[in-house]
Amino acid sequence: MKANCWMGRNSVEVREVPDPRILNSRDAVVRVTSTAICGSDLHLYDGYVPTMKKGDILGHEFMGEVVEVGPKVSTLKVGDRVVVPFPIACGNCTACEHGMFSLCENSNPNAGLAEKVMGHTPSGIFGYSHMLGGYPGGQAQYARVPFADVGPIKIEDDLPDEKVLFLSDILPTGWMGAEMCDIKPGDTIAVWGAGPVGQFAVASAYLMGAERVICIDRHPYRLRIAERAGAEALNYEEADVLDTLRDVTAGRGPDACVDAVGMEAHHPTPAMYAYDRVKQAARLETERPYALREAIMACRNGGIVSVIGVYGGVLDKFPMGSLMNRSLTLRSGQCHVQRYLKPLLAKIREGDIDPSFVITHRMRLEDAPRGYEMFKNKTDGCNKIVLTP
Ligand SMILES: [Zn+2]
Ligand SMILES: [Zn+2]
C-alpha cells in the first residue's frame, strides 16, 4: 500500500510499504477513506518530538471502512464505516474504566521510553513516535487498529466523511479544552491559537454557554475562520494581549484561558522568541511556551487555564508565582477522545455543529509532502487539509 512516511526533519514521502495485518485478536484493519494533517503532526515534521524513525507512517486522524477483524472483535464487521480515535485504549485498565482513555495503561509497548521523559507513560497514539508506541499511522491506504472493539465509532448514516472525520481528534480536543474551563453562563473565555483546535474550542465554549470568546493568533485568515465560529479576534501583532483582555473584562481577566498552541508558539518580541528558540535548538528546553505563559498571566484570579496544545518535555520561565498566588487551576491532557465520540456525533447529526467549516484544502494522499509544506508555512490560507488515499 501507499503511506505517508516521516523521512527526517522537514521531510515526508509517500512510499510503498507492506499492507498492515491483524496481529492481535482485538485488531481490525481499516481501508482509509479520509485522513487529515494535524498541527501536532508539524511538531514531528519540525523534528521536535524524539524517537521518530525514518520510514515511520504518520497520521492520527483517519476514518474508513473495516476490511478485516480479529476473532475477538464482536462490535465491528467487514464493511462497517468507522472513525478511529487517535489515542489507543484497551477499555479494561483502571485509566480506561475511569474514562481517561489517553492514559490507557496497556497500549504503549514502549512505555519505558516515555517513562524516562515523563515519569509515567500515557497511552499509545497512532503515528506519533516510538515513545508513544511506534504505531503506524493513518495517512495511508490501510491502517491496523488495535483494540478495535473499544475505540472506533460506527457511522451508520450517510453523514459525509468531512462532517465526522474530525471526531478522531480535533473536535473532541477542542471540546475538552472548553469543558475543562467549567464554563458558566456569562463567562468570558480566551483561546490562544486560531488553528482548527482553537476554532473548535471557540465553537464548543459557545455551545457550553460562554458569553464572549476571544481568540488570539497572528494569522488574519485563521482569525477570520475563528470569527465564523463566533470568536472576537485578537491579533497579537496588532494589539497587546494582556491589556486588551483586561480592557474587555473590566480589568479582571478572562474567567478561563485555553492554550491551543503548545510547544511551537511564536512571540511578537524578537528577543523573547530568540531566547526560547535558541534554548529549544540546543535542547535546553523543549518548548516555546509563550501562549501558556501569557494565558496564565491573563487569567482572572481564581480562574482556570486549560492546556490542550501539545508539549513534549520541559520549559523555562514558567510563571509559577502567578499561578500559585492567584489561586489558578491548571488543567491539561491529551483528549480522552473515546469519551466524547457518541455525544459529539449526536451534535453533528442534530446540526449543532458542522466541523467541516475548518477545511480549506482537499488533496490526494500522494500530495501529502506538498500539504505538509503548505500547512507548515501557512501559505494559501491553509487551515486544515484532508487527504484522500
Ligand atoms: Zn491531531
Ligand atoms: Zn486501557
Image (cartoon, rainbow, N blue to C red):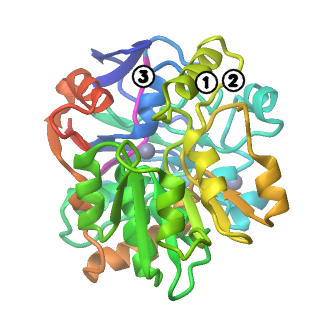
Q: Nearer the viewer, mark 2 or mark 1?
A: 1
User: In terms of sequence position, does the residue under pointer 3 or pointer 2 come before the other?
Assistant: 3
User: In terms of sequence position, does the residue under pointer 2 or pointer 1 come before the other?
Assistant: 1
Q: Are marks 2 and 1 in contact (CB under 8 Å)?
A: yes
Amino acid type indicated by mark 1: Asp
Q: Which image quadrant for residue 335?
A: bottom right
- Determine the residue positioned at 50% across, 18% down: 47
Ligand 1 picture quarter: top left
Amino acid type indicated by mark 2: Glu
Residues drawn in magenta: 56-66
- Eyeballing the image, is 180 above or below 210? above
Cα–Cα span, label 2 and label 1: 8 Å
Q: Mark 2 falls on what kind of element?
A: loop
User: In terms of sequence position, does the residue under pointer 3 or pointer 1 come before the other?
Assistant: 3
Question: Which residue is the site of mark 3?
Answer: 45
Question: Which residue is the site of mark 1?
Answer: 276
Cα–Cα span, label 3 and label 2: 18 Å
- Determine the residue positioned at 50% across, 31% down: 269
Q: Mark 3 falls on what kind of element?
A: helix
Question: Which residue is the site of mark 2?
Answer: 285
Residue 13 in the magenta stretch? The answer is no
